[in-house]
Structures are given as C-alpha cells and as structure tokens.
Image: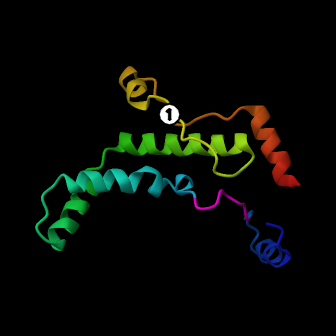
Amino acid sequence: ANDPDFALAVAQTGLDIRIMNQPPNSPDMNVLDLGFFASLQSKAYLRNSKNIDELIRNVEKEYVEYDQDMVNRVFLTLQGCFIEVMKLGGGNGYKIPHMNKERLERLGTLPTRLSCDLQLYQSVMLSLSQ
C-alpha cells in the first residue's frame, strides 16, 4: 500500500489510485463470486442441456433474462459484507449479513444502497491513513 514506485507512477497520471488490502481468499468481496455466478449457474442448470453448445446457449439466455432485482440484492449483500469487514478492522472472520431482502422488496422498502455508521467510517479512514 505504501510502495514509492507505485505512488510515483500514479502521481504522473493525475489520478487518485490507491492500493488497498482486502481480506485474503474472500469471494465475498467479489460481487460476481458472491452471488451473480451462483444464481446464474443455478438457473442455467434448470434448463436441460444435452451438450456443451446447448449449455452455452442456456447460460447466455439466462444472462439476458437475468432479473435486475437479483442484481440489486447481490450488491446489497456485497455492501453488507464490506461493512462487516470494516467492523472487524479487516479480515474474513465475519458472517454474511442477512436483511430479509425479498420481504423488504415485497414491502417496497428495499434500499438500493446501505449506509455506514459515521463513527465506523471515521475509524476505518483513520486506520487507512496510518
């Protein structure tokens, strides 16, 4: 995170790019691994595929027809995982938070993003600055 060569290269671009550590070996930090691939795979398996070409077509069909509400639910879970990691000060010793997203969706109260407690945010920013 404090590599001087990297900092010099970034300074020359005029961009604000930072190297940040994330929990090791955590597919929960990758939105594709967290939910998208798994749900896409389960939907594609519901279709009968007799060969690899049919499997590819079925996956492509499921991708095109993928429910956008599902994408929102996966991103909310990702945000919840981020918050849990921040509460622990990093690492992967957390549980994936559950917030009854389907019920909230039925009630019309499902958020599009999660908020982070100001004190938690400030403590994380302080930790990152050290």
Could you tell me which residue is drawn at 51 percent across and 41 percent down? 77
Question: Residue 76: x percent and y percent?
Answer: 51, 40
Return the residue nearer the eye: 113 or 104.
Answer: 104
Identity, as a three-letter code, of the amino acid under mark 1? His
Could you tell me which residue is drawn at 30 percent across and 56 percent down? 41
On the rendered image, what quadrant is the N terminus found in? bottom right
State the count of labels: 1
Q: Label 1's element?
A: loop
- Left or right: residue 77 versus residue 129 is left
The residue segment tinted magenta is 19-25
Question: Residue 61: x percent and y percent?
Answer: 21, 58
Q: Point out the residue furthest to the right here.
A: 130
On the rendered image, what quadrant is the C terminus found in? bottom right
Q: Mark 1 points at which residue?
A: 98
Question: Residue 93: x percent and y percent?
Answer: 64, 47
Return the residue nearer the eye: 116 or 52.
Answer: 52
Could you tell me which residue is drawn at 46 percent across and 57 percent down? 33
Location of residue 29 by image quarter: bottom right
Location of residue 50 by image quarter: bottom left
In the image, residue 88 sits, relative to residue 15, either above or below, namely above
In the image, residue 33 sits, relative to residue 70, either above or below, namely below
Query: Magenta residues: mostly which secondary structure?
Result: loop
- Left or right: residue 113 versus residue 121 is left
- Left or right: residue 32 versus residue 5 is left
Return the residue nearer the eye: 94 or 12.
Answer: 94
Mark 1 nearby-residue class (10 Å; few <14, some 14–19, many ≥20): few
Question: Residue 71: x percent and y percent?
Answer: 41, 46
Location of residue 68 by image quarter: top left
- Left or right: residue 88 versus residue 50 is right
Q: Point out the residue furthest to the top here.
A: 107
Magenta residue check for 88: no
